[in-house]
Amino acid sequence: MRKSAVAVLVLFAVFALLVLPAAAENSQTDRVILTSGYGESVTTPDKVMISFAVETTDPDAKIAQQQNAEQIAAVVAALKNAGITENNLKTTGYNIYSYTIGEYNPGKWPNGTEVYQVRNTIQMTSYDVSKAGEYIDAAVGAGANSVSSLQFGLSDAKQVSERNKALVAAVTAARADANAVASALGVNIVSTGTVSVDQSRYSVSYNSAETMLMKADATAAGVPTTIQSGELKTTATVSVVYTY
């Protein structure tokens, strides 16, 4: 038994001496080209999100609150009439605070009067960006006196589609670089190894600066609001290992 065990150990040692140098030689002679590729896809947005607010002020907090409730209800009704569904409307802020009328914040009440301001903010989402101006006109016409955010983006389905296009462009760019290097070296690429895809998914949003809109200004001339959505870009980066 002892002789058999010794024989097995000897055979294992010989095998290790023969195989390990060969493996080390193979790892040292692996020939690879590592490249990175950048791709992008540009498209028009199919999603718009707008935040509207109603601000009311009065020395009586209850009156300010009641006026605000009536105006925001009118704004919501106007947006629904314009085609926005209930599930695409949500309240994103509600604040009541007081301040004193003075030289630097004049109002229709005498200096020294404590007044209460109520601000109710709602956000709407639509997948018809061509109507962005119509939504603003409808909300302002119904009593909204602030547009605090305007954002264009992509629907979930279009995000996936544009991401795929950007990835294809990135892989194409990586392969073009690898082909150029292989040609310069006088070798041929025979296979593809590890592929790494960046985790940054989408860079596809545009936010407007805060814009204040007063109902009187919007309705005086009767000119519809024009909003340009522009284009949005989706980017992708990949790293690819090629062997030759």
Image (spheres, rainbow, N blue to C red):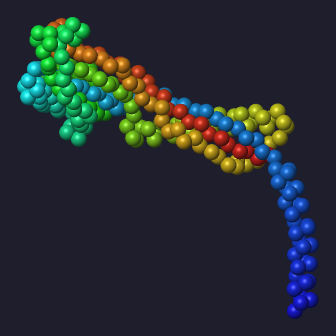
Q: Residue at x 92, y 78 (%)?
A: 10
Q: Residue at x 11, y 9 (%)?
A: 110
Q: From the viewer's perspective, is 195 left or right of 141?
A: right
**Which of the image's four quarters has the N terminus?**
bottom right
Q: From the viewer's perspective, is 44 left or right of 71?
A: right
When asked about the image quadrant of residue 8, the answer is: bottom right
Q: From the viewer's perspective, is 100 left or right of 26?
A: left
Where residue 177 sits: x, y (%)? 71, 34
The furthest residue to the bottom: 1
The furthest residue to the front: 112
Where residue 75 sits: x, y (%)? 16, 27
Residue 219 visible in rendering: no
Q: Residue at x 89, y 90 (%)?
A: 2
Where residue 234 sits: x, y (%)? 49, 32
Q: Camera-side residue: 242 or 107?
A: 107
Where residue 155 sits: x, y (%)? 37, 37
